[in-house]
Image (cartoon, grey):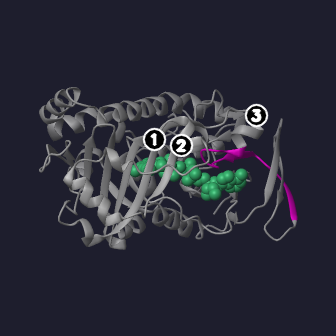
């Protein structure tokens, strides 16, 4: 494989960092990934991977690995509050492939991270350092320098073309190196659990996603058949003080007055992990030869199921720019120019979904009427800009001598 002679440092071996490492390595660049955790992190639960993200992953050669550990749900059942049958089933499955050219799938986050990690092991030009204790980097006119305190206590210093912070919502890269803001609490908590496959089979169709609306909260459920589990996430408002006082937010059981939701809650018992939801709104995604991708740049509410998808799209756009542009600084500027408007649109769609999902009576009646009238076709048409997007660098990018290998 011809190398580009460039070395990139990526902070964070999550979905964004590993996808970027793969995308850069495919161009022949050398990549060093720094991961704080001593092992691949198993945190998180289920993820919906929409066609805009899946297309990128398929191009990186992950189609089979993902297909082996994911499900293509046949649709999304929308249940208004206390309604025994779905208001509408929004079709997914083959329709998504036909219309958008890639699958809509659901899988466990850890399974996607593992598939990405295994794919990186096929590249001699990707080095992943786990258990990194600390690191510091500086941007110079011709690249970056970095000092890394490794797991074993030794210090490694290096020079590189760029450092990319894929270090998540509370990113050190954003706050310390770019002088960016802390993540902001968004007034919502997700409670997540995984239930045995059969425990909710009487309440939910297990070949589909189910979204249950309720006044002030909503629940998203989908099966992870390869684990024989069902992923459940309940989202509700929790005031700032309660979420930030260091106390563990308590599941708002008093809100719940729907037989179906009570059955799901009973199946889970106290086995819920609360997850206060933070967002990132930072004026700069880069400074000199240091830049950001994924949640580090633009963490968003998960109400359009797109946070990871945006990190994956970021990688597809940024990698060719980094190897093709004369400097990383130019690449980061073009990247932000291409990506910011789309990411802002996705994040604001997620915010309005949160409002729509949690509507109270009588607004909920109007909402249900609109969703029913729109139906499956209307849903696909409304989101074609999102799912049909093909994340690519600009067509005029000069990639002479460094095409994918
Ligand atoms: C309830 C919920 C449901 C969601 N559902 C979906 C969904 O259905 N679809 C979807 O697309 N998205 C979804 N998301 C969003 C998605 O989980 C995130 O957007 C995505 O995981 C972000 O990936 P990332 O790689 O950018 O960051 P992270 O996953 O946070 O990875 C960051 C990595 O960096 C490491 N790290 C942190 N600090 C340092 C440091 N200083 N040095 C080195 N390493 C460091 C961490 O250990 C971690 O491995 C959901 C989120 C939530 C909370």
Q: Where does the image place residue 261, in percent across and percent down from the top left?
A: 26, 53
Q: Is residue 311 magenta?
A: no
Q: Give the residue pinned by disc 1.
A: 391
Please give the name of the residue rendered at 24% of the width and 60% of the height, measured from the top-left corner.
Answer: 263
> Left of 365 or right of it: where is 162?
right
User: In the rendered image, which quarter contains the N terminus?
Assistant: bottom right
Q: Nearer the viewer, residue 113 or 405?
A: 113
Kindly indicate whether the residue at mark 1 contacts the one at mark 2 (C-beta within 8 angstroms).
yes
Decide which of tag 1 and tag 3 comes sooner along the chain.
Answer: 3
Disc 3 to disc 2: CB gap under 8 Å? no
Position in image of residue 24 (x %, y %): 61, 53
First-in-chain label (2 vs 1): 2
Label ID, residue 288? 3
Please state the horizontal and vertical placement of residue 165, each as a whole percent of the image: 67, 46
Category of crowding for the residue at label 1, using alpha-carbon neighbours closer than 10 angstroms: few (below 14), some (14–19), many (at least 20): many
Mark 2, other Cα within 10 Å: few <14 / some 14–19 / many ≥20: many
Observer-side mark, 2 or 1, equals 2
Q: CA distance from mark 2 to mark 1?
A: 8 Å
> Dot 3: few (<14), some (14–19), or many (≥20) neighbours within 10 Å?
many
Look at 48% across and 34% down and name the residue there: 343
Residue 356: give x, y in percent of width and height. Answer: 30, 32
Task: Name the residue carrying label 2.
Answer: 314
* Mark 1 → mark 3, Cα distance in angstroms: 24 Å
Contact (CB < 8 A) between labels 1 and 3?
A: no
Front one among 381 and 256: 256
- Specify the quadrant that holds the C terminus: bottom right
Label tally: 3
Say which residue appears at 52% left-offset and 38% top-offset: 393
Tell me: 378 left or right of 115. left
Which stretch did the figure color magenta?
155-172
Along the viewing direction, whichever of 366 and 267 lies nearer the viewer? 267
């Amino acid at each position: 494989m011809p190398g580009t002679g460039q070395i990139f440092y990526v902070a964070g071996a999550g979905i964004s960092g590993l996808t970027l490492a793969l995308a850069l390595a495919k161009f022949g660049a050398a990549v060093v990934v720094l991961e704080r955790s001593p092992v691949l992190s198993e945190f998180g639960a289920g993820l919906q991977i929409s066609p805009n993200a899946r297309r990128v992953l398929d191009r990186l050669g992950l189609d089979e690995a993902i297909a082996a550990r994911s499900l293509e749900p046949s649709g999304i059942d929308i249940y208004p509050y206390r309604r025994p049958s779905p208001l509408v089933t929004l079709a997914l499955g083959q329709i998504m492939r036909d219309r958008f050219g890639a699958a809509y799938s659901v899988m466990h986050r850890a399974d996607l991270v593992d598939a990405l990690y295994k794919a990186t092991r096929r590249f001699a030009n990707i080095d992943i350092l786990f258990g990194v204790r600390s690191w510091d980097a500086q941007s110079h006119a011709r690249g970056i320098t970095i000092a890394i305190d490794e797991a074993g206590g030794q210090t490694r210093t290096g020079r590189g073309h760029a450092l990319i912070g894929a270090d998540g919502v509370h990113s050190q890269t954003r706050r310390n190196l770019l002088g960016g803001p802390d993540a902001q609490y968004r007034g919502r908590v997700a409670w997540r659990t995984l239930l045995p496959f059969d425990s909710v089979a009487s309440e939910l169709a297990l070949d589909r996603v189910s979204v249950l609306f309720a006044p002030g909260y909503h629940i998203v459920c989908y099966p992870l058949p390869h684990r024989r589990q069902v992923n459940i996430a309940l989202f509700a408002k929790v005031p700032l003080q309660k979420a930030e006082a260091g106390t563990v937010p308590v599941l708002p059981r008093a809100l719940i007055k729907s037989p179906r939701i009570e059955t799901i809650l009973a199946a889970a018992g106290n086995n819920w992990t609360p997850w206060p939801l933070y967002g990132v709104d930072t004026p700069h995604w880069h400074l000199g030869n240091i830049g950001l991708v994924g949640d580090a740049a633009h963490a968003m509410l998960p109400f359009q199921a797109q946070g990871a998808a945006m990190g994956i799209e970021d990688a597809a756009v940024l990698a060719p720019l980094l190897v093709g542009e004369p400097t990383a600084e130019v690449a980061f500027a073009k990247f932000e120019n291409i990506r910011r408007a789309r990411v802002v649109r996705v994040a604001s769609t997620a915010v309005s979904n949160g409002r729509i999902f949690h509507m109270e009576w009588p607004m909920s009646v109007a909402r249900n009427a609109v969703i029913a009238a729109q139906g499956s076709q209307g849903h696909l048409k409304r989101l074609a800009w999102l799912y049909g997007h093909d994340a690519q660098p600009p067509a005029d990018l000069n990639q002479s001598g460094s095409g994918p290998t």
